[in-house]
Image (cartoon, grey):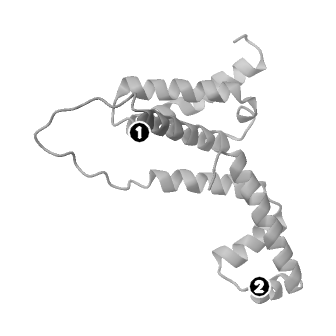
Amino acid sequence: MTDGPEAQLMRVLHDQHAPALRSYALELTNGDRARAEDVVQETLLRAWRHPKVLDQSERSARSWLLTVARRIAIDEWRSGTSRAEVMTDSPPDPVGDDGTERAVQGWLVADALAELSTRHREVLALCFYHGLSVADAAAKLGVPEGTVKSRTHYALRALRLALEERGVTR
C-alpha cells in the first residue's frame, strides 16, 4: 500500500478500531491470541478491499468491522480449520449471553437509522418505538393516515437497504 489517502485512512482506521477489534476477536476465539490476530488481520484486509468503509463515520466503521470479524470467526469455526481436539476431565463452562451481539446489532440499527430522513425516522419512532397506531401517529404528526402508512413503507425499505449495506441480512 502506498502512502496515498487510502493508506492514511487505513492507518486511522487501524489506530481507532484495532484495540476494540482485537479484544472482540479474542472473545470470538476463546482467548486464542494467534487466531484472534488472524481474524483482525483478515478484517482489516477486507476493509482495505472495500474503500467505502474507510469513508464511514467512526461508529459505522466500527460496527462494520465487528460484524466482519464475527463472520470471519464463524466461517473459520464452521470450516473446521480452527477445531483442535482438547482432552479434559470436566465439561466446559456454559457460555452465557454477555450482550455483545445485542450491542453490535444496536450500533448497526442506530447507524442505519441516522441515514434516514427526519420524517422517516419520526414515523418509525412513533409506530415502532412508541407503539402508536397509524391513526394516533397521523394525529400526532398532523398528516393523513395514508401518509403515515406510505412513510412507514418507504422508511422500512430505506432502513433495510441501509442495514444490508452494513452486512446485515435476514
Find residue 47 and report its image quarter. Answer: top right
At 85% from the left edge and 74% from the top edge, which residue is drawn? 150
**Left or right: 83, with 74 as reference point:** left
Quarter placement of the C terminus: bottom right
Give the label on residue 67, or none.
Answer: none
- Residue 98: image x %, image y %? 38, 53
User: Disc 2 to disc 1, how far (Cα)?
Assistant: 42 Å
**Left or right: 112, with 102 as reference point:** right
How many C-alpha atoms fall within 10 Å of the one at disc 1: few (<14), some, or many (≥20)? many
Find residue 137 and report its image quarter. Answer: bottom right
Residue 147 appearing in the image: yes
**The one of 132 and 68 positioned closer to us in this rendering:** 68
- Judged from this view, the residue extending furthest toward the front is 79
Give the label on residue 28, or none.
Answer: 1
How many C-alpha atoms fall within 10 Å of the one at disc 2: few (<14), some, or many (≥20)? some
- Residue 86: image x %, image y %? 21, 32
Amino acid type indicated by mark 2: Val
Find residue 154 and report its image quarter. Answer: bottom right
Where 22 sits versus 166, above or below?
above
- Judged from this view, the residue extending furthest toward the left is 89
At 58% from the left edge and 56% from the top edge, which residue is drawn? 106
According to the picture, the residue beneath numbered tag 2 turns out to be 134
